[in-house]
Amino acid sequence: MPVPDWYPDLNAGLGGPEPRAYPLGTLTIQGLMALVLNDGIAATSAAAAAIPLLAALLTFGSLKARGAPPLVAAAAAIAWCGCPYLVVAVHVRAALAEGWGLAVLPWVLLNWLPPEPAGPRGLARGALAFALLLTLQLPLAYMAAVVVMVAQLAAFDARRIAAAAGAALLGTGLAAISWLPNLVAARTLDFRAMYEGSYHWSNHFLPGVRPDDP
């Protein structure tokens, strides 16, 4: 039976048939699911069901923690877990690294947007939240960091801006260990295989980088 190019078995359910370097967080989640279910494809199906549920729960809890009314929080949770981008990423592209990152994004923003991070505990929570996102999907972590820094600068609280920047640096340091296995593996591979044919995120971080970018 013919299968689509993104068929999960081609790339361990991580999206796309070409080999890629993924952070340890995403690989660990999918590896544990495959171990429990004794089937890599079943693990992909389980993740496709779990990601929208987690996205809804974290969105609801994060908005409630910020003081949103229950009905507003519930409506936002439904909108986020059913938004076209997340649905396509998980159920069409099987990009589970992106899916897990999108699922935890509301909780990351809860601990990193104004009025957070507040105090040493807030800084620690912000760092852990950013570190988690970095271990799941790097481009999403980059975009979240840009949004947070713009919001912090707009709020213009020098102490909180410094705390948010500190959380970003500390989170980056905490997450760096998740990439060590990839660095070791890269020494034994033709590294071109890790990026040839894949989506070049470096061309899409900022508008106008590419000559043909409208």
Image (cartoon, helix red, strand yellow):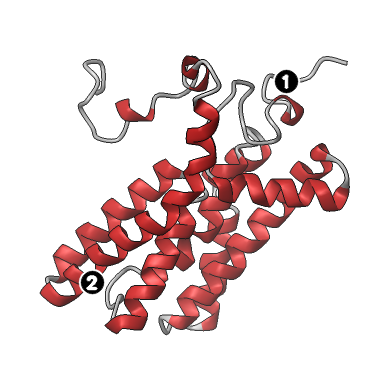
Q: Quadrant of the N terminus?
A: top right
- Please tell me the numbered disc located at residue 4: 1
Assess disc 1: are there few (<14), some (14-19) or many (≥20) residues with their C-alpha within 10 Å of its C-alpha: few
- The reply to whether dot 1 and dot 2 touch (C-beta < 8 Å) is no
x and y percentages locating residue 99 in the rendered image: 58, 47
Q: Look at label 1 and name its amino acid.
A: Pro
x and y percentages locating residue 42 in the rendered image: 83, 43
Q: Look at label 2 and name its amino acid.
A: Ala
- Please tell me the numbered disc located at residue 121: none
Give SS at disc 2: helix
x and y percentages locating residue 194 in the rendered image: 51, 22
In the rendered structure, the answer to whether residue 72 lies left or right of residue 43 reads: left
* Occupied quadrant, residue 15: top right
Give SS at disc 1: loop
In the rendered structure, the answer to whether residue 64 lies left or right of residue 55 reads: left
Assess disc 2: are there few (<14), some (14-19) or many (≥20) residues with their C-alpha within 10 Å of its C-alpha: many
Q: Quadrant of the C terminus?
A: top left
Confirm whether residue 3 shows in the render: yes
Identified at 63% across, 36% down, the residue is 14
* Occupied quadrant, residue 41: top right
- Does 9 appear above or below 69? above
* Occupied quadrant, residue 161: bottom left
Measure how far apart labels 1 and 2 are at the Cα level. 46 Å
Query: Mark 1, mark 2: which one is toward the viewer?
Result: 2
- Please tell me the numbered disc located at residue 163: 2
Identified at 53% across, 58% down, the residue is 80
Mark 1 or 2, nearer chain start? 1
Identified at 48% across, 19% down, the residue is 191
- In the image shown, does 18 or 24 lie closer to the viewer? 24
